[in-house]
Amino acid sequence: MSDVEQATVAEDLQRRIAELERENAELKEKIYTKAISAGEFFFKAKDYDAAILEYLEAIELKPDYKEIRDKCAEAYYNLGLGFLNRKDYNTAIENFNEAINLKSDYKEARDNLEKAINLKKEHEKFQKQRFFTSKPSALKIIGNVVVSDDEYDEITSQRRT
């Protein structure tokens, strides 16, 4: 192959690479737009798990877009509120932390994170108090099995015979 032919092939390859890069950028833009639209749809439908997945896909394509990070943070925040209302404090705390990781100045998420932590502590304290102050239950432990008093009496009477 002559120098002229090699130069022509090299130019053709460079043109093809530039064309593929343009197509790739266009495809990424379409995927980004689809992810944003789907995220907004799911968010309005209060399907925050699905909204987060879509927003995270958009963030992966354009990590510097603050607007999308804020939307994703809001979805995590709303999930946190839902878990807080269901008294699932650990999951609420995880979601509020995710929201804060995406939007560090998210005051509402910080406030509710603190609330979830305090409620979790109160709940754990209450559970401990209840455990130590409750009357002994009518259960007995035999090995790894917990049985009622009646079952215990039956098992122990069978052993005696």
Image: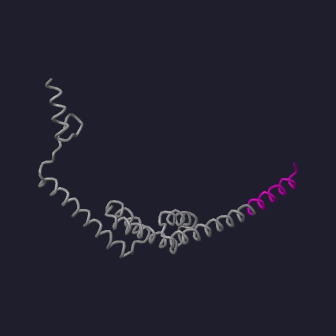
Residue displayed at 81% across by 58% down: 12
Residue 9 sits inside the magenta stretch? yes
Q: Position of residue 24 (x, y in %)?
A: 69, 62
Q: How many marks?
A: 0
Residue 8 relative to residue 87: left or right: right
Above-or-below relation of 136 to 102: above
Residue drawn at 49 percent across, 72 percent down: 71
The image quarter containing residue 32 is: bottom right
Left of 37 or right of it: where is 95? left
Residue 28's spot in the image, x, y percent?
64, 65
User: What residue do we see at 24% from left, 36% from top?
Assistant: 144
Residue 128: image x %, image y %? Answer: 17, 56
Q: Nearer the viewer, residue 129 or 154?
A: 154
Quarter of the picture holding the C terminus: top left
Span colored in magenta: 1-18
Here the colouring is one colour
